[in-house]
Amino acid sequence: MPARRKGLDALDLEILRLVRERPRTGLLEIARLLGVARGTVQARLDRMSADGVITGFGPVLSPAALGYPVQAFATLEVEQASREHISAALHAIPELLEAHIVTGQGDVWCRLAGRDNEHIQRVIDGMLTIPGVRRSTTVITLSEVVAHRVHPLARLRG
C-alpha cells in the first residue's frame, strides 16, 4: 500500500474550493474545470474524507430561514463531576447549535438559536434545570461579522 500524503496540495485546495463554491456541481464537471480525470477528483475527495479533512457533504442550513433568527452565546458553569451527564442533556436541546468545554471563565460555551429573545430565555431556563449546571451568562448576537469558516485554514501552509 502506498504511503499516504500529508497535508493538502494545490489540486486538493482547488477541489475543495469548487466543492465549497459550487456544492451541486458533479464530479465530472469539477474534473473538467480542473483539467484532470474524474477518478482523480473522486480519489482526492475519498482521501480527504478518510483523513478527516472533509467532515460532510450535506447542505448548510440557515437557522434564520428555519424561523430561528436570534442567536446567543451562553456560558455555563457546571459541576465537573457532572460533565458527561450535562453533555448528554445538552445534546437533546434542538436549539443548541454547538457546545464546547472551555478553559478560562465558565466551563461550557453554547451557541443557541431562537425565534425571539423570550424563546432564548426559555431555552436557557431549561438548561439551568439540568442537574450539575450551576449558572449561566448569556449574550445575544446583534449581527454576524464573519460566518463559521474553516477553508482559510486549508490555504495556510507552514
Image (cartoon, grey):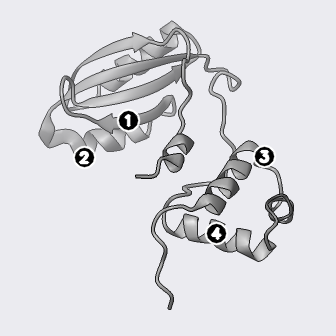
Mark 3 and mark 1 lie on one chain; the one further toward the N terminus is 3
- Could you tell me which residue is drawn at 34 percent across and 25 percent down? 127
Q: As rendered, which of 11 and 26 lies closer to the eye?
A: 11
Residue 44 - label: 4
> At label 1, which amino acid type do we have?
Ala
Residue beneath label 3, please? 22
Whole-number angstrom distance, CA of label 1 to CA of label 2: 13 Å
Which tag is nearer the camera, tag 4 or tag 2?
A: 4
Whole-number angstrom distance, CA of label 4 to CA of label 2: 37 Å
Residue 126 lies in quadrant: top left
Which tag is nearer the camera, tag 3 or tag 2?
A: 3
Q: Give above or below for 114 relative to 32.
A: above
Residue beneath label 2, please? 84
Circle 4 crowding by C-alpha within 10 Å: few under 14, some 14–19, many from 20? some
Under circle 2, the secondary element is helix
Under circle 4, the secondary element is helix
Where residue 88 appears, as percent x and y from the top left, is 34, 44
- Whether tag 1 and tag 2 are in contact, CB under 8 A, the answer is no
Q: Is residue 66 left or right of residue 25?
A: left
Where residue 100 appears, as percent x and y from the top left, is 33, 37
Mark 3 and mark 2 lie on one chain; the one further toward the N terminus is 3
Residue 99 - label: 1
Mark 4 and mark 2 lie on one chain; the one further toward the N terminus is 4
